[in-house]
Amino acid sequence: MSLTPADTPQPTAISVRRKIPLSLIVGGLIVGLHLLAGILTILWTPYEPTAMVGGRLAEPSIAHWAGTDRLGRDLFTQILIGARIALEVGSGAVLVGAGIGITLGTLAAFATRTLDDVFAAAFDILIAFPTLLVAMLIVTASQTASLFTAVLAIGIAGSAIIARLTRILVKRVLSMDYIVAARVAGSSWPSIVFVHVLPNIWPTLIVNLALQFGLAAMAESSLSYLGLGAPPPNASWGRLLQEAQGTVYTAPFGAIAPGLALVTLVIGMNLLADGLRAFADPTRRRSR
Amino acid sequence: MRRSAILLVSVVLASAVLFVLLRLLPGDPANALVSVGADATQIEAARRQVGSDLPLFQQFLRFLTDIAKLDFGVSFVSGASVLREIGDRLVVTLPLTLSAFISSIIVAVPVGILAAVRQRTWYGAGISVISQLGIAVPAFWIGILLVTLFAVNLQLVPSGGFPTDGWSAPIDSIEALILPVATITLVMSASLIRYVRSATEEVMSSDYIRTARALGATLTGALVRHGIRNGAVPVISILCIELASTLLGAVVIERVFALPGLGSMLLLGIEQRDYPNVQGVLVVSTMLVLIAGFAADVIQRLVDPRLRGRVSGGAS
Amino acid sequence: MLRSFSIPTSLACCIKLGIVGFFASTTAFAPSLHAADFDANASINIGSLYEPQNLDNTAGAGQGINEAFNGNVYEALFRLSDSGAVEPVLAKDYKVSEDGLAYIFTLQPGVKFHSGEPLTAKDVKHSIERVTGPDSKSSRKNSLKGIASIETPDDATVVIKLSARSISLPYNLSYVWIVNDSGKDLKSAENGTGPYKLGDWRRGSSLSLARFEGYWGTKPTNSGVTFRYFTDATALNNALLTGSVDIITSVQSPDSLKQFQTNKSFTVAEGQSTTKLLLAYNDRVAPFDNVKVRKALARAIDKKKLLNAVWGDRGLVIGSFVPPTDPWYVDLTKVDDYNVESAKALLAEAGLKDGFTFTIDTPNYDPHPLVAQFLQTEYAKIGVKVNINIITANEWYSKVYKAHDFQATLQEHVNHRDIVFYSNPDFYWGYNNSKAIDLVKSSEASMTTDEQTGRLKEANTQIAEDAASNWLYLYPQIVVSKASVTGYPVNGLNSQFFTSAIQKGGK
């Protein structure tokens, strides 16, 4: 769940010299590290990801930094690939969620009052339904579970939150005097949306999307825990965690390493979001 | 109320959409009733029994008339009354959710306010870090950790399960819920702390607090007198959503602690395509969501007099 | 201890078998404590992963109901003992006509249902017809279709007339619960003759059985049992570690065993299961219609390594569908032993030198996804590319079992004596070899068990030679209990779990 507390869209200040918040730096570093690891796996991995190179559930060692799984595959390799998958899931889900959410939210804000109320109620209901369940239904409905359906499902499930936020933000902008003036002056809707509304709300939206990114990675791990996430041999962290479930007491390293990777990425994304917010909104510079 | 009416209409629409969506799922409710070795005629018999051999339109009519009569029917798979099973599971889910919810508030509100007021101190920063962790760590991890520590090693509380006879021995039932409640509280309060802190910060930077402080009030005094009312409104709507989503969203926790809750009933229902069960759970939980929303509305109005005049207060 | 019951061996005369109360009789039970050492009023908590879906085994209750109810709540005319022998229960004795087409059963006297009504021949007739009737979802319906009529000349006698000889009739009747004919809905209630009656069933959590005081046979050595159901194996293990369950009926991962083996307060018992994991091809479609391709795929898999990955050093590599507990077991592991070079050669002979691509429909629960990945890696070595398609159990029935819309699938088969599936060309895997079919069919008309066993061994060998499916391994059956709890069955035949002889040590 993440609804950012009502954020006031601030007109972007023009040339105030801003201090870059610490959280932005730390978050950026963490996410950057994950990004690097993800990109690296396209070119090179320590071992062939599916090769059974070690013993069954071997403890972490020089040869296998994070140990091996039941099939003797190198876990460190899998975790690196997991970074790429997490970034794919995160950005994919955020793209899907933002696409649907911003469109619907904007439409609702522009709609007649009754229609707007219906939209608002629909968003509320959707938000009240756990992201996980919505995603679960979508994954089950699509004939085959794949990374793509997981991304789609998490994106759609998260879109209600973005839609709700967008609606509120757009309505606030629309009530401002200069928009009223523009409407009176006869500006077309598209021009109002693209010239006035979107540029005004994006700082807040970006912050929220960054949060959604982390949540998407978490949702994927929960879906995988329930056996509905990215199918093998995708080495998503969620799936690694799920496979390590049965051995969590006897070979805890199998659950710890991918778990740490997931936790750091989510924290990194959250810090990044906090930093962005503080950066985009210099009037309230406190770190959040 | 207008908002409730709209919500109700949305629920009816949502259940129709759900009906279609469920039927689009690959698989067949009859499949849960056959096992390897069954032949084609037996599969047909199973389809007749659950009505999945009827045309979709007829199934839909059946569904509508049943819902209109508030008849939740019997489970395709177990043959047991859906309503009774929901009742059986609510006595686990409701206490679990409500106590987790209340303890989260008890933890999060003071800690969140403290974090906002003392944000430049080391413990303000500490709270931030811990709440970050609480949000980022998967719930089942926390659950497993707590079980290992308090159930397996210290043997203080049971590791999972719920008494067969429900609440007839309340002490046992409460013991069974301690760790699950603690797990949900940790996860839920971590995110609540952030909302409370944001809301408090918002209030602190507002004109009336500045004015109050300029007039000589202490920060704490000003916050107590003016801040809570204003800050509470957005937090309450967040709380309502958290409460609602925990009702069904506790499924992962239910699994870690082997609790027979509403979430796992829904999960199993979807797995087995047991439509009566799935629809029953969704209708009941939607009603609970409505009630929670209504309660949030009422409380918001009580807290913030400015909202009293408004006919339809979107939870913004 | 009683000797195990043997099936009539000659047609020359009618064989009469007198059976004494057998209930205390199983041979493979874990060692019992001395009689005085246990608490007859103890209640036993049994942890399991297999919750029944409903309570009626003719209405699709799933394997969980066998575990909870077979021999505990319901009894049959015969039963499959823990050691795999067919023993009479509610049939006191029986005669077979010379032509083998009529079976005359005399019922055990003094048997009462839990409702208090006495057992009569009419109940038996009703019970059998429930399984063979049009609404039955029982997977054993087909094996009883040779029954032409059931007569009840008096309350204690049942005569079953067959349309063709059926040497497995007593065995097949061990699946037929004897229920009272009062017509209660048995999906959520019961009315059997067993040593326990149903207490409470809390769906998603537990099912309790209470000792039935009017039981006709040997009284249980405990006051009742509660099956506690878990969906997560780790949670189940924790429940035993913390003492909230006394026994785990079937441990599903070798790794959790370490914590029990090193601790003196627990007993780990390994028995034999009938659960086989197989990669079933759709033998109807190319290239799986080619025996060379199937053999190549069998030889390309290092099954020992696979078994080790999933089960550590437990379980058993098998070379056919028949597990050692079936009377017609033959060790056929050498037929298509692991040999990558010969696998490649066979593929080349089949004209697939450059390999091919196929999809494995993989059930979404452990161990299937893991095994599918293993196969994927192994097959890559002979140039065969595998796509893994994860599906739910429900979809599996629609797509694979009913529509035969698949190339290959992973599936576990739990039943005892289920080689008959290979004699049905319409079965999902579509194996169709007239010699094997004839052998299985004619074995049923055998006059002696030796003859039956001989034919089925031959069929078994034929099916293995054809590599009809790829039989990967036999699951181990591992029961873990508190050291103070004894007397439970250790073999998982048909997932049964007789609880009547379970004893819990003194306080």
Image: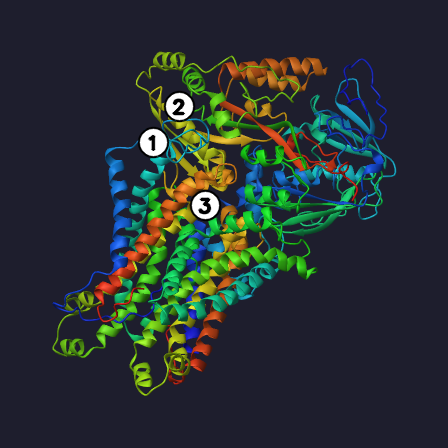
> Do the residues under discs 1 and 2 have CB atoms within 8 angstroms?
no
Residue position for label 2? C378
Residue sitting nearer the eye, A197 or C429:
A197
Residue type marked 2:
Glu
* Crowding at mark 1 (Cα within 10 Å: few <14, some 14-19, many 20+): many
What SS does tag 1 mark?
loop
Q: CA distance from mark 1 to mark 3?
A: 21 Å
Q: Are marks 2 and 3 on the same chain?
A: no
Task: Give the x, y percent position of residue B38.
Answer: 58, 35
Q: Chain of mark 2?
A: C
Residue sitting nearer the eye, B186 or C459:
B186
From where the camera sits, is residue A110 visible?
Answer: no
Q: Which mark is residue C264?
A: none
Task: Give the x, y percent position of residue B300.
Answer: 43, 78
From where the camera sits, is residue A161 visible?
Answer: yes
Q: Chain of mark 3?
A: A
Residue position for label 3? A225
Instruction: Kindly report which numbered mark, 1 or 3, lies closer to the viewer in this rendering.
Output: 1
- The correct choice, above or below, for C345 with respect to A51 in the image is above
Q: Which mark is residue A49?
A: 1
